[in-house]
Image (cartoon, rainbow, N blue to C red):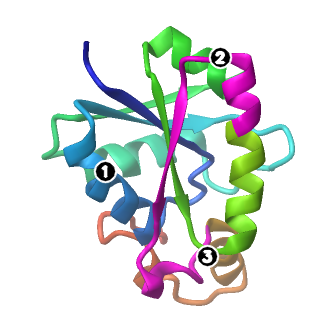
Amino acid sequence: MKRIALFPGSFDPFTIGHEEIVRRALPLFDNIIVAIGYNSAKQGYFSLEKRINWIKDIFKDENKIIVDAYEGLTADYCVVKNAKFILRGLRTAADFEYERAIAQMNKMLKHDIETVFLLTKPEHSPISSTIVREIIRYGGDASQFVPKEIDLLK
C-alpha cells in the first residue's frame, strides 16, 4: 500500500516554510498531496488558480508531489484520496496546541488517519502566510519569504 500524505492549507501564499516541510517529508511518503482547502474563516488574497500554479511550478521536477484543491472536511478528503497521513508543520508551541486539537478531531472522525508533525527550521519559524500577505498588502518586499518561483508582482 502506498504511503500517501495530505499537506492541507490555504497557502495564501505558499511560503519557504511550506516548501521546506514538503521537501523534508518526501523521503517519508510515496506521494504528498499539497491540497489547497477552502477555509470559510479566511478570505483568499491570491486566486486559487494562481496558488495552484505557483505550487505546481515549485515542485515541477518532483513526481511524488500532487497539487489539488478541495472543499469540506480534511479527513473526508483524505478518504477520497486514500491518504492515511496528514502532514503539518509546526513553528511554535501555539501551533502545536492548535494542530494537536485538529489532529485529535481528525483521528476521532477517521480512526485510520495519522497526523505527522515536522518542526520548521528555526529561521522559518517567524514566517507565516498571514504576515507575508500583510507585507504584500502594504507594498513591502516579501520575496525573501516565498519560493523563487512565486512572482508576487504578477
The span picked out in magenta is: 104-128
Label 3, secondary structure: give it.
helix
Magenta run includes residue 120? yes
The N terminus lies in quadrant: top left
Which residue, given by chain and number where applicable, does mark 3 sit on? Answer: 132
Residue bearing the label numbered 1: 25
Q: Is residue 152 above or below residue 80?
A: below
Q: Is residue 23 visible?
A: yes
Q: Position of residue 8 (x, y in %)?
A: 55, 40
The span from disc 3 to disc 1 (Cα, nearest Å) is 23 Å
Q: Confirm or deny contact between disc 1 and disc 2 (CB under 8 A).
A: no
Residue at image position (72%, 36%) is: 104
Query: Which one is closest to the eye, mark 1 or mark 2?
Result: 2
Which amino acid, by three-letter code, is at mark 3? Val
Residue type at tag 2: Lys
Return the residue nearer the eye: 62 or 82: 82
Q: Any mark on residue 110, and which?
A: 2
Q: Nearer the viewer, mark 3 or mark 2?
A: 2
